[in-house]
């Protein structure tokens, strides 16, 4: 088993375990006097930083390409090695070879990465919600396990959207971020505990890392299944 597959398996286990702990926290809020008056601004600032980093990455194609690790197959067949390299350009930071068509969307005659656009849209909406809840004290939702479960399901769909195409992929990447946001809001509402909030922020980082690893695995799988040696092979 390759290092990438081991990393994906480990991160998926960590993500699922984190989800289970979150449910336990909501159903059994920790009883602790350790709290701070500026809990919400602190947690909101940290989540805002995560969203901003995500938006910046989404609008920097080169950075995003490096994170997703696009590369050609490492083990070319003899026949493929003898063929002249196929000239492949980039479209929305994906190889424009036809194998990544499901990863892009076309809006106003421009092609964009469905995942990056979806994550940026979700993060932008989440930023507005973060300002309302964490900084202006607007209670967006009540303590409700159904909302928490909906957030967890949204995250799960966001992690497992690789068989889908175009705008569906864009929407699921958006709700991935929104699911994480509403999970954070619910945990803060249930527990009112800064330690629980920071724990959840750490789990959100694990979810993001898992999302990146799954993208790496998906792109690696597509390239390895290709029998042609393209001009991008070995670039990454």
Image: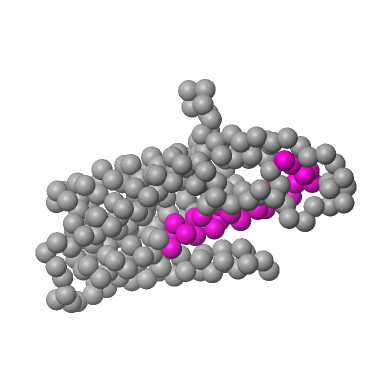
**Residue 138 vertical placement versus 27 (above, below):** above
Residue 71: tell me if it is visible.
yes
- Residue at 51 percent of width and 64 percent of height: 12
Q: Quadrant of the N terminus?
A: bottom right
Residue at the far left: name it. Answer: 37
Verify whether residue 84 appears in magenta.
no
Image: 149 above or below 193: above
**Residue at x-position 21% and y-position 60%:** 42
Counting labels gives 0
Magenta residues, dominant SS class: helix
Lateral position of residue 86 relative to residue 176, left or right: right
Q: Residue at x 59, y 52 (%)?
A: 69
Q: Is residue 54 above or below residue 37?
A: above
Side (left or right) of 8 relative to 50: right
* Left or right, 166 with reference to 181: right
Q: Nearer the viewer, residue 197 or 67?
A: 67
User: Which quarter of the figure has residue 204?
Assistant: bottom left
Residue 207 within the segment the image draws in magenta: yes
Between 166 and 224, the residue placed more toward the observer is 224
* Residue 5, image x, y percentages: 62, 64
Residue at 20 percent of width and 50 percent of height: 133
Left or right relative to 219: residue 112: left
Rendered location of residue 15, percent (x, y): 46, 65
Residue 235 horizontal/vertical position (percent): 66, 48
- The image shows residue 153 at horizontal and vertical percentages of 42, 55
Task: Name the image colouring.
Answer: one colour
Q: Magenta segment range?
A: 206-231
* Viewer can see residue 166: no
């Amino acid at each position: 088993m390759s290092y990438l597959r081991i990393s994906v398996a480990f991160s998926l286990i960590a993500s699922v375990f984190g989800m289970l702990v979150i449910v336990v926290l909501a159903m059994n809020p920790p009883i602790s006097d350790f709290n701070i008056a500026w809990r919400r601004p602190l947690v909101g600032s940290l989540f805002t930083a995560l969203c901003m980093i995500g938006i910046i990455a989404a609008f920097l194609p080169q950075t995003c390409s490096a994170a997703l690790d696009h590369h050609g197959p490492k083990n070319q067949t003899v026949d493929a090695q003898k063929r002249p390299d196929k000239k492949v350009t980039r479209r929305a930071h994906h190889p424009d070879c036809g194998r990544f068509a499901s990863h892009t969307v076309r809006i106003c005659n421009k092609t964009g990465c469905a995942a990056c656009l979806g994550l940026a849209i979700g993060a932008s909406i989440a930023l507005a919600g973060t300002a309302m809840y964490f900084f202006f004290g607007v209670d967006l939702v009540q303590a409700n396990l159904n909302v928490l479960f909906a957030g967890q399901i949204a995250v799960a769909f966001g992690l497992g959207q690789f068989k889908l195409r175009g705008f569906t992929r864009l929407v699921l990447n958006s709700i991935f971020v929104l699911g994480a946001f509403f999970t954070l809001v619910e945990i803060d509402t249930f527990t009112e505990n800064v330690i629980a909030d920071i724990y959840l922020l750490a789990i959100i980082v694990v979810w993001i890392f898992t999302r990146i690893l799954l993208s790496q695995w998906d792109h690696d799988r597509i390239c390895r299944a290709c029998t042609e040696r393209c001009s991008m092979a070995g670039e990454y």
